Image (cartoon, rainbow, N blue to C red):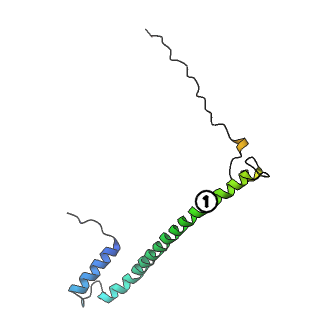
Amino acid sequence: MLRPTKDLFTRVTEVTDAWGKMRPHKQFYGLTLEGFKEAAKPFLDARSEITQLEAQVTHAVSKRDAAATILLEILQGVVAAVKGDPAEGQNGELIGAMGYVPKNQRSSGLVRPRKSEPPASGVIS
């Protein structure tokens, strides 16, 4: 039965641990254990750097989400203030430039479905 595929980090760790415990002074593939560790160092360093960067991204996302909650409330207040301003109002060009549809340009939302014709009730002989 085949063993499930392991990721490279797991394989490197298992090989290094077993080699170090069982045959620490023997060479394989022309490498000593220290030589193998040195060859694996760039991979392991990059993996460690990725882990650190992922932690930074997670932290930055949580900071962004916390700031977004506050900013959304402020944004809604500004838009409400623009709509309530007598000089600007709900139909002004500023509200349209902000990405909102002015009240006088909105459709009513009323949808009248078309009446379908009743099916023909003739029998074909």
- Type of amino acid at the residue the image marks with label 1: Glu
Instruction: Give coordinates of residue 111: x percent, y percent.
Output: 61, 32
**Picture layout, residue 77 above or below residue 12:** above
Q: Residue furthest top?
A: 125
Name the foreground residue: 36 vs 80. Answer: 80
Q: Quadrant of the N terminus?
A: bottom left
Residue at image point 24% right, 81% down: 18
Q: Residue furthest right?
A: 87
Instruction: Give coordinates of residue 102: x percent, y percent.
Output: 71, 46
Residue at image point 32% right, 78% down: 12
Judging by the rendered image, the residue that carries numbered circle 1 is 73
Residue 110 sits in which quadrant?
Answer: top right
Q: Quadrant of the C terminus?
A: top left
Residue at image point 68% right, 55% down: 79
Residue 32 sits in which quadrant?
Answer: bottom left
Name the foreground residue: 79 vs 11. Answer: 79
Q: Residue furthest bottom?
A: 25
Residue 109 sits in which quadrant?
Answer: top right
**Picture layout, residue 43 above or below residue 79:** below
Name the foreground residue: 121 vs 73. Answer: 73
Residue at disc 1, secondary structure: helix
Instruction: Give coordinates of residue 83: x percent, y percent.
Output: 72, 51
Q: Categorize mark 1 by other alpha carbons within 10 Å: few (<14), some (14-19), many (20+).
A: few
